[in-house]
Image (cartoon, rainbow, N blue to C red):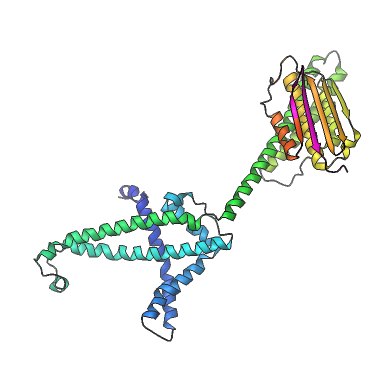
Amino acid sequence: MAGALHPLIERTTWRRWAHLVVGGALLMPYWFLGMTLAALLPFNGPGAGVLALLVFPAAAAFVTGLVPSVRLLESSLAKELLRGPAAALAPGPAATWESRTRSGAWFTLHLFAGVVVSGLSLAVPPFAFVLVMAPLVDWDERLLGRWARPGTWAEWAAPPAGIAGVAVLLVLIVAGGALLARLAPRFLGPTAAERLAELEARAVRLAERNRLARELHDSVGHALSVVTLQAGAAGRVLDTDPEFAREALGAIEESARAALEDLDHVLGLLREDRSRPAPQPTLKDLGRVLEQTRLAGVRLDSEVDPQVEHVPAAVSREAYRIVQEGLTNALRHAGKVPVRLRLGVSGERLEMEMSNPLGARGVGSGHGGGRGLGGIRERVTVLRGEMTAGPDGDRWRMHVSLPLGRVS
C-alpha cells in the first residue's frame, strides 16, 4: 500500500497541497490569540469578528515573519514542497530589514492561503460525497427536504454538482500552489544587496583560489624543475666530481624543503587552517633562487640593484615570484641555456628584464602546461604594471615594469 502511494505523494500537486495545509495549521494559534484579544474589546458585533479572525492574526503573523530564522524555515519549506520557481531558492536567515519585511508578508500570505485551502479540503469532500450518493441512498427527509424532494430531477443533479465541487477544489489547490511557487522567489529570494554581497564573496573566493594556484605553480613548479636538473647533473658527475655532487644534493634538499613548506601552507589554507604563518619570500631571498638555478647547470648572468631589497613589501613578494617563474620557464622551455637577468629600480618603478636563447626545443615546448606566463601576467595586472614577453630574434625576452608608488 505504501509503495503504491509513494509516487502519488511525490507529485508536485500533493506537495503544494501539503505546503498550504501546513500554513493553515500554523494559523490556528494566531486565531486563538485573535479571539482572546477580541474578547477584551469593549464592543461586540461584526467589527470584533473581523479583528479576531483577520486583523489580529495577520498582524501577529507578520511580526513573527520579521524574525530572521523564519525566512530560513519558510525558504526550506517552499524549496522542498512548492518546487517550480521556488526550487531555486537558497535558504538562509534574513539579513536586512528589507528581507525581513518581505519574509513577514510571505509568512502572512502563506498562513491565510493555507487556512482557506485547509478549510475547503475538510468541508468539500464530505459534502461532495453526500451529493454523489444522493440518488442512491434513502437519506433522511430532514436532510434532503430543504433543497429538493426525493425522486425529483434536482436529486439527480446532485452527483454532477458534487463532482464539480471536488474539481473546483483541485483547481484551487493547483492554481494556489502554482501562484505561491511563482511568488516565493520574490518574497523569499535574495535582495539586491544580498546578491551583490554574494557576488563579492564569490569573487573573493575565486581570487583566493587563483592566488593559491599561482603560489603553488610558481613555488613548487620551480622547485621541481630545479630539483630535476640538479639531480641529473649530480648523477652525471657523481664519480668525477663528488664535491659538486654533494653541493647539488644539498641544494636539492633545500629546494625540496622550501617546496614542502609552501605546499603545506597552501594545503592548510584549503583546509581553512590559519595556524601556520604564510611563507612570504621577497627580493631579499632572491639570492637563494639564483644560486639554486646555477647549481642546476644554468649559466645565469644576473645584475640585481641592491635597492630592490627596499621596495614595498607587496611589490617585493610579487617580483620574487615573477623572477622565480621566469627562471622556471627558461629551464622548462629552453633547457640549460644561458639566462640573462637585469633587476633594478628606475625612478618610481621596478624594472625587470630576463632573456635567454630560444634553445633547441623552441618556444612553447617543454612540460609547463602553458600557465607560467599567464600567472606572471596576473601578478603584473594586480600591481597595475606593464609586461611584454615573446621572441626577439633568436632570443626569448620578457620585460616587466612595476610601479612602486614610493621606494622605502
Q: Determine which quarter of the picture holds residue 50.
A: bottom left
Q: Residue furthest right?
A: 306
Q: Position of residue 7 (x, y in %)?
A: 34, 47
Quadrant of the rendering where the C terminus is positioned: top right
Query: How many numbered circles are shown?
Result: 0
398 is within the stretch colored magenta? yes
Residue 125 lies left or right of residue 212; in this view the side is: left
Residue at 42% across, 49% down: 84
In the rendered image, which quarter is residue 384 located in?
top right
User: From what the image shows, is residue 176 above or below residue 291?
Assistant: below
Q: Position of residue 390 (x, y in %)?
A: 73, 24
**Residue nearest the viewer, comparing 134 with 254:** 134
Q: Is residue 45 visible?
A: yes
Q: Is residue 192 above or below residue 389?
A: below
Q: Is residue 257 visible?
A: no
**Is 185 placed above or below 59 here?**
above
Of 55 and 385, the residue lying toward us: 385
Name the residue at the left extreme: 151
- What residue is shown at x 81% (from left), y 25% (from top)? 293
Question: What secondary structure do most residues of the magenta stretch adopt?
Answer: strand
Name of the residue lying farthest toward the bottom: 42
Horizontal side, residue 295 vs residue 382: left or right: right
- Residue 81, x across and y down, in percent: 42, 53
Using residue 92 as the reference point, say whether residue 295 is left or right of it.
Answer: right
| Place of residue 327 in the rendered image (x, y in percent of width and height, measured from the top left) | 78, 26
- Residue at x 43% of width, y 79% of height: 36
- Span of residues in magenta: 388-406
User: Residue 284 appears in which quarter of the rendering?
Assistant: top right
